Image (tube, rainbow, N blue to C red):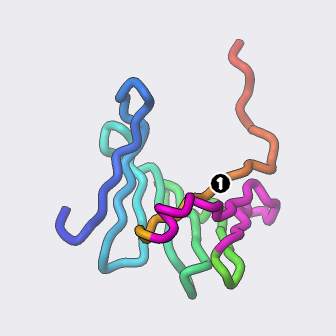
Amino acid sequence: MPDARVLAVTTAAGEPVLTLIKHAHERITEFQRPGGGLAGRIRATQTTRHYTLIDDQDQTVGKVVGDLALKHFSVTATGGGEIARIRKIWAGLTKEMLTPLDHYKVEFTAPSRRQPAP
């Protein structure tokens, strides 16, 4: 894809999980299922610290808002309850000094909605 960054996410065994596509000229990142179908989007809104989470039916399912330093983010569902926190963490001296890469830790704060298998 021209003017896009593509990241394929796989399991340790190399099985595809999803693909992220960051479009260069739009403030949107797409998530695709292993078969190529759309799973959802992240749309940057207002500033670089406000994001809208959108499902494959173009419905808003959540919001992400970061602090002014872009180090702590709160993820909320459409109903308003927090479901996760994202925090920028120290990447190590070499990576911090020599690359633009950042490390983040995700903490899920809401209980899982998954039902146990019968």
Residue at the outermost bottom position: 46
In the image, 12 versus 20, the foreground residue is 12
Q: Position of residue 98 (x, y in %)?
A: 42, 69
At a point 40% along the width and 36% down the height, the residue shown is 10
Residue at the outermost front position: 93
Q: Is residue 84 magenta-colored?
A: yes
Q: Is residue 26 magenta-colored?
A: no
What SS does tag 1 mark?
Answer: strand
At a point 79% along the width and 60% down the height, the residue shown is 82
Please indicate whether residue 72 sits to the left or right of residue 97 in the image: right
In the image, 18 versus 5, the foreground residue is 5
Residue of label 1: 105
Mark 1 neighbour density, 10 Å: few (under 14) some (14–19) many (20 or more): few
Please indicate whether residue 29 sits to the left or right of residue 54 in the image: left
In the image, 61 versus 84, the foreground residue is 84
Q: Position of residue 4 (x, y in %)?
A: 27, 66
Magenta residues, start to end: 71-97
The amino acid beneath tag 1 is Lys
Q: Position of residue 96 (x, y in %)?
A: 51, 67
In this picture, is 81 found above or below 69? above
At a point 75% along the width and 54% down the height, the residue shown is 83
At a point 37% along the width and 34% down the height, the residue shown is 16
Q: Position of residue 104 (x, y in %)?
A: 60, 58
